[in-house]
Image: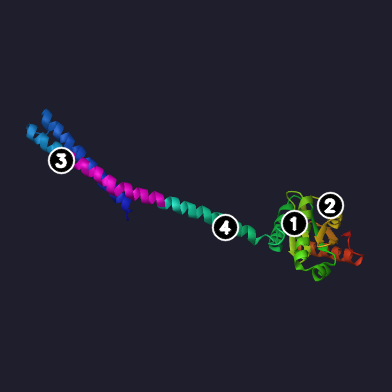
Amino acid sequence: MRFHKVELFFFLLIALAGFGGLFAWAAYSAASGGLVVGGGDAAAKFAMMSAVLTGLSVVCGATLVLPTLSRGLSERGTLEKMTESLSVRSLSLEHAAVTDGLTGVYNRRYFDDALTEYISAFSSIGKPIGMVILDLDHFKTVNDTHGHDIGDEVLRRVAECLRMFIRYHDVVARLGGEEFAILSPNISESQLFNLSDRIRQAVSEIAVRNGNVTLKVTVSAGLAIWDGEESGEDLYRRADKQLYQAKRQGRNRVCAA
């Protein structure tokens, strides 16, 4: 078993203090005619040794133990600060790993994980899970005509719009490009359709200015309610199929499975 340096210094300090106390007792015993004999001369010698050892204890504490403890506390404080900083950075990196950098909503990775967890949890209680897939209409024309900077601003504004409508336990994510998705547990098909249509109307009211031009965009949406048995991929395919149905029917509309 290896001892830390400060522990060795502490043991030395205890030993010096112990011997100092022993000599102090011997001096008292010799002076009072107790177990230690020798009279006043012996008492004086023992008292001197006690004083020397007490002085050494003070010197040891001041020059060895105290500086070592101070360095240890300083190093501990530094390590705690480093750990705290690393924890904050870790949380930031973890958040960045599941967040879309452009819009601030969740990314596809988080959405897929949330879908798996929701299906696992809600399968045991028999509650529905709704999914909405949304895609901006003619978004390529926006980028080609107005530039990617304006296109990025449109995506950010749409993401803000989506966040305004979702509940605290809903998940909104950008799946890629101009495609977004909402995962909404414990909701009926009519409620999900109404939610999707309100979002569609709100997106159509977004106005993005590019110089003298005011840009308006629309969104198509497809939705599906989990049937209680299908996989997350199957639920996504059904919602995505309804999205393409909305596109085929003229865009700027909501279709349900």
Disc ID at residue 172: 1
Labelled pair 3, 4 in contact (Cβ < 8 Å): no
Q: CA distance from mark 2 to mark 1?
A: 13 Å
Tags 1 and 4 touching, CB below 8 Å: no
Query: Which circle marks residue 195 in the picture?
Result: 2
Q: Amino acid at mark 1?
A: Val
Q: Earlier in the sequence, mark 3 or mark 1?
A: 3
Residue under label 3: 49
Residue 52 in magenta stretch: yes
Q: Residue furthest top?
A: 32
Tell me the element at label 3.
helix
Q: Position of residue 177 (x, y in %)?
A: 76, 67
Q: Name the kind of residue labelled 3 in the image.
A: Met
Estimate how packed mark 2 is, as few (under 14), some (14 to 19) or many (20 or more) residues with alpha carbons within 10 Å.
Answer: some
Instruction: Decide if residue 80 is on the left or right side of residue 37.
Output: right
For residue 231, say whether it is visible.
no
Q: Which residue is mark 4?
A: 90
Residues rendered magenta in the picture: 50-74
Q: Compare marks 3 and 4 and give the one earlier in the sequence.
A: 3
- Screen quadrant of the C terminus: bottom right
Q: Amino acid at mark 4?
A: Ser
Disc 2, SS = helix
Q: Is residue 156 above or below residue 41?
A: below
